[in-house]
Image (cartoon, rainbow, N blue to C red):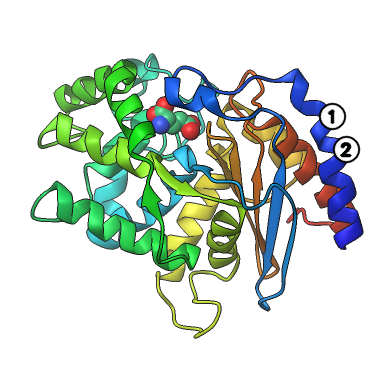
Amino acid sequence: MQVLLDKIVEDSKKLTAKGKVASYIPELSKADASHVGIAIVQTNGKIRCAGDYMTKFTIQSVSKPIVLLQALMDNGEEEVFSRVGMEPTGDPFNSIIRLETFDGSKPLNPMINAGAIAVSSLIKGKDNAERFDRMMTLFKQLSNNPDLTVNEDVFMSEKLTGDRNRAMGYFMKDLGSIRGNVEEVLDLYFRQCSIEVNCMDIANIGAFFANHGRDLVTGEQIVPVRYMNIVKTVMMTCGMYDASGEFAVNVGVPAKSGVGGGIMCAVPNRMGIGTFGPSLDKKGNSIAGLNVLSELSKELQLSIF
Ligand code: GLU
């Protein structure tokens, strides 16, 4: 297994020259495009790693499934899906166009920016600090890492330049998908995206999904199975931007990608996988990460289909 992982990482490194690191958030452009790493956490506790698996990066959109779990636990399924849909878009992750045209006047799904901003507005707490603390507690628990922190430089960079997200926030307030103070909701959203992780952290989160919401060590059911199933299904259909269909064919497991270069996967009953490679393709997915995962899926027959 180790030999296989080392080889897949080495082969995938060659592809990194074909993509670009995200630069629309200025701070992200500092990443080293040649980095590639993977961590696997099996539901039986075994761990495997290769490449730059300890390198830190910001979680970005890989945060979306976790915040959706929190929103479901805080509000229940009916309330959450009255504010956000569950249909794939086929549009880029930061697209604004369907906010006005989609029937129901709500963002299409919780894995695109608009939907995730609406979901962030549902997190309970007396103020923004408490809302973020509650979110962060869940991130720490699922990643099995009590030391997770926010990269304040990335947070400020997003806050200062995130005008498209800001536009969507105000538009959704007008639609009624968001209640409350838009700037506070955006701060919460930018903060969740700026949490710093490595491959191990997101592999642990993937393993939690693979284990249907039970703690890997204690067996405690931390999130109801129904909510886990909802979020995994939304990851499967919408988690890899407008390449979710292709990913379902080539890899075949629920996954979520982020523009920081991370991909988190859950292989039900078997393992969580975290990959990192900040060189992205045109749709925003890590080029090396996609290659690592499709090779691994072939070798280990990971597809759920
Ligand atoms: N913070 C990023 C944004 O809002 C997340 C995008 C992503 O990772 O897909 O644009």
Seen in the picture, residue 132 relative to 168 is either above or below; the reply is below
Q: Where is residue 46 in the image (x, y as percent from the top left)?
A: 71, 74
For the residue pair 191 and 96, the one nearer the viewer reads as: 191
Q: Which amino acid does label 2 sit on?
A: Asp
User: Residue 262's quadrant in the figure?
Assistant: top right
User: Residue 101's quadrant in the figure?
Assistant: top left
Q: Residue at x 39, y 18 (%)?
A: 98
For the residue pair 290 and 298, the one nearer the viewer reads as: 290
Q: Is residue 96 visible?
A: yes
| Number of other residues with Cα within 10 Å of mark 1, as a class: few under 14, some 14 to 19, many 20 or more | few
Q: Position of residue 202 (x, y in %)?
A: 55, 54
Seen in the picture, residue 169 relative to 50 is either above or below; the reply is above
Seen in the picture, residue 256 relative to 273 is either above or below; the reply is above
Which quadrant of the figure shows ligand 1?
A: top left
Q: Is residue 84 visible?
A: no
- Which residue is under mark 2? 11
Could you tell whether 155 is left or right of 50 in the image? left
Please identify the quadrant where the N terminus is shown.
bottom right
Point out which mark residue 14 bears: 1
**Are discs 1 and 2 less than 8 Å apart at CB?**
yes
Q: Which residue is drawn at 70% across and 41% down?
A: 248
For the residue pair 226 and 214, the one nearer the viewer reads as: 214
Q: Residue at x 36, y 38 (%)?
A: 116
Q: Position of residue 45 (x, y in %)?
A: 66, 76
